[in-house]
Image (cartoon, coloured by chain):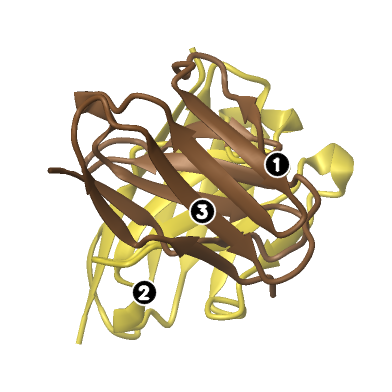
Chain colours: A yellow, B brown
Amino acid sequence: EVKLVESGGGLVKSGGSLRLSCAASGFTFSDAWMTWVRQAPGKGLEWVGRIKSKTDGGTTDYAAPVKGRFTISRDDSKNTLFLQMSSLKTEDTAVYYCTTGFGELYPWGQGTLVTVSS
Amino acid sequence: DIQMTQSPSSLSASVGDRVTITCRASQHISSWLAWYQLKPEKAPKSLIYAASSLQSGVPSRFSGSGSGTEFTLTISSLQPEDFATYYCQQYNSFPLTFGGGTKVEIK
């Protein structure tokens, strides 16, 4: 069974940092392009960024609101995806989901809540 | 960035009703469109990819159609477990963008 489990969410003050993890199982993680998507309270889904597989270059792309503050990385030996978030703002408060796919995203984890207080 | 516009933003329907949700892209995206179902406290579920292909395990009452800039998601006979929020997403170009969502509520 393909499974993605996010962790690391919590309450952090504005300007602070947090690292999210996503543990993957049930598929060849090293071949997968991995993506982070978030949903702010009462809002819709927002793409955060993605990392390609190492065989496809391992490069990253980010949404404009997080570029320069968030960093996506991966540890293929541990089947784990990371999202390092720094200089956090109150508007980064959201449930963060990890997911996989080249375009359509399937499957998704259950998400982890990040709350940034002022 | 490609803007995705969904309509309606919410609707009320009864079990057994036929429900149609529309998604419009600000640019031509061929058939690079997916649909997702979101419920509180649950992992988002992929329903449709490539505009009309049903994801494995998704009931056949769900269907998708369209190409270019206009797309629809249809639920042929609404079931109690279908009350949720639905999102379209384009993957023709980066950044990936989502529609604003359509909340399907019980009438």
Q: Quadrant of the N terminus of chain B?
A: bottom right
Where residue B84 sits: x, y (%)? 27, 41
Residue A26 falls in which quadrant of the image? top right
Give me the residue at 57% from left, 23% from top: B55
Q: Quadrant of residue B38?
A: top left
**SS of the residue under disc 3:** strand
Q: Taking B56 as reference, is A94 left or right?
A: left
How far is disc 1 from disc 2 in space, using C-alphas?
23 Å
Q: Which residue is mark 1?
A: A33
Residue A8 % position (x, y)? 32, 50
Secondary structure under tag 2 reads helix
What number is the disc on residue A92? Answer: 2
Disc 1 and disc 2 on one polypeptide chain: yes
For label 1, the SS is: loop
**Residue position marked by numbered label 3 in the rendering:** B22
Instruction: Work out whether disc 3 and disc 2 sit on a shared chain.
Output: no
Q: Is residue A106 above or below residue B101?
A: above
Badge 1 vs badge 2, beta-carbon distance below 8 Å: no
Residue at mark 2: chain? A
Residue type marked 2 = Asp
Tell me whether the residue at label 3 lies in contact with that at label 1, contact meaning CB atoms closer than 8 angstroms.
no
Q: Earlier in the sequence, mark 1 or mark 2?
A: 1
